[in-house]
């Protein structure tokens, strides 16, 4: 018997973003829910510790007693991650981050996304670079939404992103990971957490991202647009944990033909 | 009276109204909001010192659900 070389298994490092350690690798958005109670329940069921929020104009003249998102997701219980969704220029994205920092009493972790096109919501990478540079200079800790492009991901890391967040597929599309080999290359090159952001549709998509070695997955629509969002939130939490364990366990090599699981020795016929 | 713009709407206020009074008039006192006057963020601690000037363009923002 020749000695088998043990399969290489990756080191289990906790998810650390901008110096803080998180036990959940699922990050969730808070949009598209039917009401704040559903938002609260789904967020809780997901087990997520980092939740994204959007910054928008206050509704003037509405009921001042109407519940606020931050009443159901208090900043002392969750790490709030303000996003720059809806921004198509670096200028608007930087402005949004500054407003978010004021709103959240100096909290400086943000999710940068600068979009290029309404139809695909693909990122405008050039504007993203410009915004990132300014935000880093202004003292923000920036998690950056980007294409599944290893070159752009590396550049963003070099520029000071605290996490690189390639899309799996277009935002809200639920198409799953369209380009697993690029995601793998991004993961292999990265020195900061790689978090798949956008495009997962169901639990198996999230598990695939984790099996590729991603540090986490950020999702919104896959949960909020499920027929039963709270149940899907729970499923996603399990898929993320299962995918992570499978990644650490090291999957078996793929083989073209069968390999019997029961021993052939001791057959009596 | 002076006319200013708040979140894209034209509104009239008495002269020497400060930002804290504006936030109260909008029913947003004690709410978690951030305020920008002519693209410059005004920290919460400075609302009472900041007087409105005719033509000011004010944005009042808050957090909502988003992905």
Image (cartoon, rainbow, N blue to C red):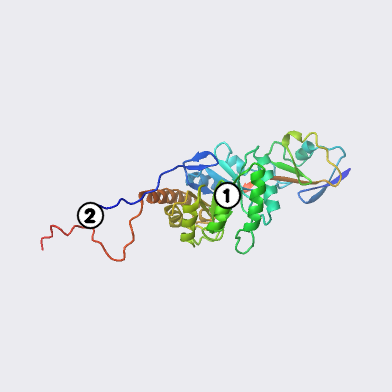
Q: Which residue is mark 2?
A: A2
Give the side of residue A61 with respect to residue A194, left or right. right
Q: Which residue is mark 1?
A: A158
Q: Position of residue A254 (x, y in %)?
A: 34, 61
Callout 2: few (<14), some (14-19), or many (20+) C-alpha neighbours within 10 Å?
A: few
Label 1: chain?
A
Q: Position of residue B65 (x, y in %)?
A: 61, 49
Quadrant location, the N terminus of chain A: bottom left
**Nearer to me, A231 or A165:** A165
Q: Earlier in the sequence, mark 1 or mark 2?
A: 2
Same chain shared by disc 1 and disc 2:
yes
Q: Position of residue A66 (x, y in %)?
A: 65, 43
Quadrant location, the C terminus of chain A: bottom left
Residue that extends furthest to the bottom in the rendered view of this protein: A257
Label 2: chain?
A
Residue that extends furthest to the front in the rendered view of this protein: A2
Residue that extends furthest to the right in the rendered view of this protein: B1
């Amino acid at each position: 018997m020749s000695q088998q070389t043990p399969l290489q298994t990756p080191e289990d490092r906790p998810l650390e973003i901008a110096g803080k350690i998180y036990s959940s690798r699922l990050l969730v958005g808070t949009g598209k829910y039917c009401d704040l109670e559903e938002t609260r329940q789904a967020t809780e069921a997901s087990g997520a510790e980092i939740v994204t929020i959007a910054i928008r104009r206050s509704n003037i003249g509405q009921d001042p007693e109407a519940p606020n998102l931050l009443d159901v997701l208090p900043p002392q219980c969750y790490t709030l991650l303000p996003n720059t969704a809806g921004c198509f220029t670096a200028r608007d994205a930087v402005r949004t981050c500054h407003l978010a920092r004021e709103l959240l009493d100096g909290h400086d972790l943000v999710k940068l996304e600068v979009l290029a096109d309404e139809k695909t919501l693909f990122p405008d990478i050039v504007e993203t670079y410009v915004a990132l540079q300014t935000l880093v200079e202004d003292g923000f800790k920036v998690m950056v939404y980007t294409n599944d492009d290893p070159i752009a991901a590396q550049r963003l890391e070099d520029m000071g992103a605290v996490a690189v967040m390639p899309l799996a597929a277009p935002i809200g599309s639920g198409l799953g990971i369209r380009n697993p080999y690029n995601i793998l290359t991004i993961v292999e090159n990265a020195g900061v957490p790689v978090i798949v952001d956008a495009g997962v549709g169901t639990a198996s998509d999230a598990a695939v991202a984790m099996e590729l070695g991603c540090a986490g997955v950020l999702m919104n629509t896959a949960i909020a647009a499920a027929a039963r969002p709270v149940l899907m939130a729970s499923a996603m939490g399990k898929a993320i944990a299962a995918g992570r364990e499978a990644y650490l366990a090291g999957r078996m090599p793929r083989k073209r033909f069968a390999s019997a699981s029961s021993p052939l020795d001791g057959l009596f016929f | 009276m002076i006319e200013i713009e708040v979140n894209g709407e034209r509104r009239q206020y008495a002269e020497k109204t400060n930002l804290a009074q504006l936030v109260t008039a909008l029913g947003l006192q004690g709410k978690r909001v951030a305020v920008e006057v002519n693209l410059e963020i005004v920290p919460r601690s400075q609302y009472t010192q900041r007087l409105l000037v005719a033509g000011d363009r004010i944005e009042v923002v808050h957090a909502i659900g988003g992905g």
